[in-house]
Amino acid sequence: MDSYLSRAAAGGRQGALLLLVAALVLGGCTVQLVADYDAASFEETLRVGKMVDRFYGDLLDTPPGDRAYANFAATYIEIEAELRSLLTRNKARPLNEESVAIAEIILKQWTARRDEHKKTGTYADGEARLDRDRFAREFASAARAETYKAAGNSGQ
Amino acid sequence: MKDVAMDMDKVWQDMTAAVATVLNKEWGKAGACVQDALQQEQGALGRIAKERLAGTIDDAQMRRLLEDEKDALKVALLACEVQGKKLVEAAANAAVDALVAAVRTTLGLAPV
């Protein structure tokens, strides 16, 4: 009985192996570790990055005494909504953990800047310049992560 | 049924050669991504120091900005991670392609 079961198990393993080889040979099997490139996500990343850069351009162009939170509240809310949309889009795609993590970090920093501005009622030039620079680099990284997903494009 | 035999040593050589080709071609680019991320971070830390020395930010602001830079570096390295995963993906697919080619040749099937 044991011998019969061993033979049956061995036959099952051989069958499974045969099926695997057949699938590889005939089915065009490929390994996928990251999400497919998504042109809409790439464009959305550039667009929201531009909105953030524009926000800081406007802020730095405003005299420090006129930088009350209320003057920028609507733009903060608009950009936050765009960042949440970008995060949702990234979360909806399988094998996309890195872009989700990037979008979460940018959103966390953006809401922290908004809360701080609301609390202090101002935004100093030095801080604004450095925040603008950091967000620009982060959006560039987010866009680059998307381009790396393009098929056969790992080296960009 | 036709009796088929495969030279597994040859198949293994083909698979490792395919992987090596991909890695040799792309590995430098993956390393350059990390190098670039570190260089950009170095520049950012220098700018924070410059603003602090100029007195345009205070200690608390500097500490907050440095904390945010940790996340900025993480973001840059996450992008490099995507590139690294694509590299592993390409290497794995090259190995599978070599195996499939060997099996098809052994079975007398046309190449895919």
Image (cartoon, coloured by chain):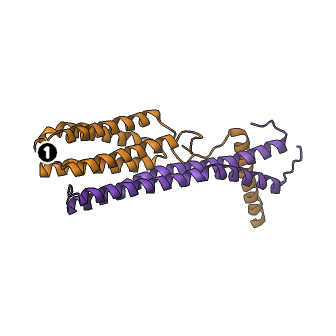
Q: Is residue A128 visible?
A: yes
In the rendered image, the residue lying farthest to the front is B54
Depth check: B6 or B77 in front? B77
**Number of numbered discs visible in the structure rendering:** 1
SS at mark 1 in the image: helix
Please say if A153 is above or below B76. Answer: above
Residue B97 is left or right of residue A105, and the answer is right
Q: Residue at x 22, y 37 (%)?
A: A58
Instruction: Characterize the local packing of mark 1: few (<14), some (14-19) or many (20 or more) Cα atoms within 10 angstroms.
Output: few
Residue at 10% x, 44% y: name it.
A65
Up-down relation of residue B58 to residue A112 (above or below): below
**Residue at the extreme bottom:** A2
Q: Which chain is purple?
A: B
Image x and y of residue A74, in percent: 18, 36
Q: Residue at x 29, y 57 (%)?
A: B50
Specify the amino acid type for callout 1: Pro
Residue B63, given in percent of the width and then of the height, sits at 26, 62
Q: Quadrant of the C terminus of chain A?
A: top right
Q: Closer to the camera, B71 or B36?
A: B36
Direction from residue A134 to residue A34 in the image, left or right: right
Q: Position of residue A87 (x, y in %)?
A: 36, 43
Quadrant where the N terminus of chain A sits is bottom right
Examine the rendering and report whether any part of residue B88 can be seen.
no
Q: Nearest the camera: A103 or B35?
A: B35
The residue singled out by tag 1 in the image is A64
Q: Label 1: chain?
A: A
Q: Nearer the viewer, residue A67 or B47?
A: B47
Q: Farthest residue in the left direction?
A: A65
Q: Hue of chain A?
A: orange
Q: Is residue A92 left or right of residue B91?
A: left
Rendered location of residue A143, percent (x, y): 43, 41
